[in-house]
Amino acid sequence: MNRLKSGYEVIFIVPESRRHEGKRVYDWIIETAESLDLGRMTQRSDVEGTGADGKLHSAHFFDLADQPIELMYAMDEETAERFVTAVEATGAPVFCLCRPVYYGQLNDKSG
């Protein structure tokens, strides 16, 4: 797999409605990523999830504000450490998942 890089997938999962210092937590994460020049991200809106406190977070027909949001990034180990540390430094409450992966753009015709 030498055409792919070895690194980490970093996923942050947070209810859409969660705020920290008046700002949505996932906005804190996106801004932190941009400050580290992490441009490639996938955002997923999940149907439901259960938090550490056992509370169900879900998208309801009339209220989507409690819908779980996932922000997924792939990067090298050093960048992953800097990113997680920077998000942690914001003080924003968020669940984080990091796992080793191989990643890369296949069949890149841009260059």
Image (tube, grey):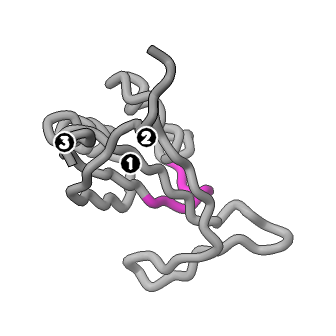
Is residue 85 in view from this perspective? no
What residue did someone put label 2 on? Answer: 29
Type of amino acid under label 1:
Ala
What residue did someone put label 1 on? Answer: 92
Which mark sits nearer the N-terminus, 3 or 2? 3
x then y, percent, for residue 39:
45, 28
Q: Residue furthest right?
A: 62
Give the CA separation, mark 1 to mark 2.
9 Å
Which image quadrant is residue 52 in?
Answer: bottom left
Q: Secondary structure at mark 2?
A: helix
Please state, as top left, top right, bottom left or bottom right, where the C terminus lies in the image: top left
Q: In this rendering, which labeled residue sits more in front, label 3 or label 1?
A: 3
Which image quadrant is residue 85 in?
Answer: top left
Q: State which region is magenta.
A: 13-19
Q: In this rendering, which labeled residue sits more in front, label 3 or label 2?
A: 3
Do the CB atoms of the residues marked 1 and 2 lie less than 8 Å apart? yes
What residue did someone put label 3 on? Answer: 2
Q: Residue furthest bottom?
A: 54
Residue 106: assigned label: none
With respect to residue 67, does 74 lie above or below? above
